[in-house]
Amino acid sequence: MMMAKIVEIFHSIQGEGKYLGVPQVFVRFFECNIHCSWCDTPHSIGDTTRHFKEYSLEQLALEIKKHWPGSHSISLTGGEPLVQADFIAQLLGVLQNLRMTSYLETNGILPNELSKVIDRVDIVSMDLKLPSSTQCGPFWKEHEEFIQIAKRKDLFLKVVVSNKTTIEDLQQAVDLVARSAPDVPFILQPNFFDMKEGVIDRCVEFQKVCLKRLSDVRIVPQVHKFMKLR
Ligand code: SF4
């Protein structure tokens, strides 16, 4: 029987991106395929001393149903959920049958795994990982392939801007998106930990640069951190 490694399942408010403020059920998958410098979910990284629980499809569906009343959608998050894409492909079939909207939160660097689930997913929240921000990568080729597959769904892109983010990296991301999906919402997300150090000014400056080539560029902070929600 196929099992998934899950860190936690809970109900909360989406604190980022295009669907900011909607109530969701969050399913946090264990493990990630990269390691960003600021990662706020260290328990999701492949550290086997951390805790996860294994769920069958039926067990997870039951748990989701318990948290579902009043929710807008199910956020499949992590870690990187696509590390467990075979399980997610099956889960999405169950969610479709239950008429629940699915929302995939991904680092956007596993296009082959995305291909396994894209037919059944509704919303894709994709990060563009800039090397100067994350201190890992670059993933330009993977990101471009990923966008090509994801753009037929309700896709939006998210770029975390820290005090280390360079204009050169941003420009490269804008070139890539201008080629592949210039009208998809492009969200600049100020890094919460740099808020006191002028990162908003940097976002405003970056937004002007992005708007020369992209049609929908927004600055959206992580609101759940201000609200002290998970
Ligand atoms: S992709 Fe997400 S989960 Fe993975 S290391 Fe980066 S911030 Fe953490």
Image (cartoon, rainbow, N blue to C red):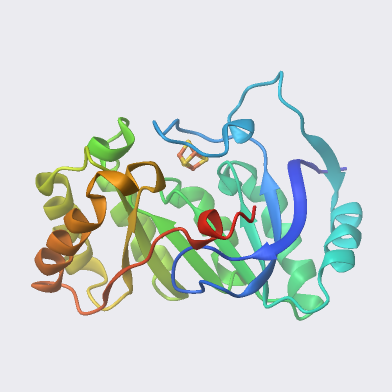
Q: Nearer the viewer, residue 196 or 82?
A: 196
For image coordinates 18% across by 73% down, the residue present is 214
- Image check: 60 left or right of 203? right
Q: Position of residue 138 (x, y in %)?
A: 26, 37
Q: Nearer the viewer, residue 161 or 145?
A: 161
- Image check: 150 left or right of 200? right
Residue 65's place in the image compared with 7, above or below, is below
Residue 140's place in the image compared with 220, above or below, is above
Q: Position of residue 147 (x, y in %)?
A: 35, 62
Please identify the quadrant where the N terminus is shown.
top right
Q: Residue lying at the far top in this picture: please name it.
A: 49
Q: Nearer the viewer, residue 82 or 160?
A: 160
Residue 196's place in the image compared with 155, above or below, is above
Residue 200's place in the image compared with 102, above or below, is above
Q: Quadrant of residue 57?
A: bottom right
- Image check: 138 left or right of 46? left
For image coordinates 30% across by 34% down, the residue present is 137
Q: Residue lying at the far front in this picture: please name it.
A: 196
Q: Nearer the viewer, residue 2 or 15?
A: 15
Q: Quadrant of residue 187?
A: bottom left
For image coordinates 14% across by 51% down, the residue present is 172
Would you say residue 129 is visible in this rendering? no
Q: Position of residue 210 (x, y in %)?
A: 15, 66
Would you say residue 85 is visible in this rendering? yes
Q: Position of residue 26 (x, y in %)?
A: 69, 58
- Image check: 223 left or right of 190? right
Q: Quadrant of residue 27?
A: bottom right
Q: How many marks?
A: 0
For image coordinates 36% across by 59% down, the residue present is 158
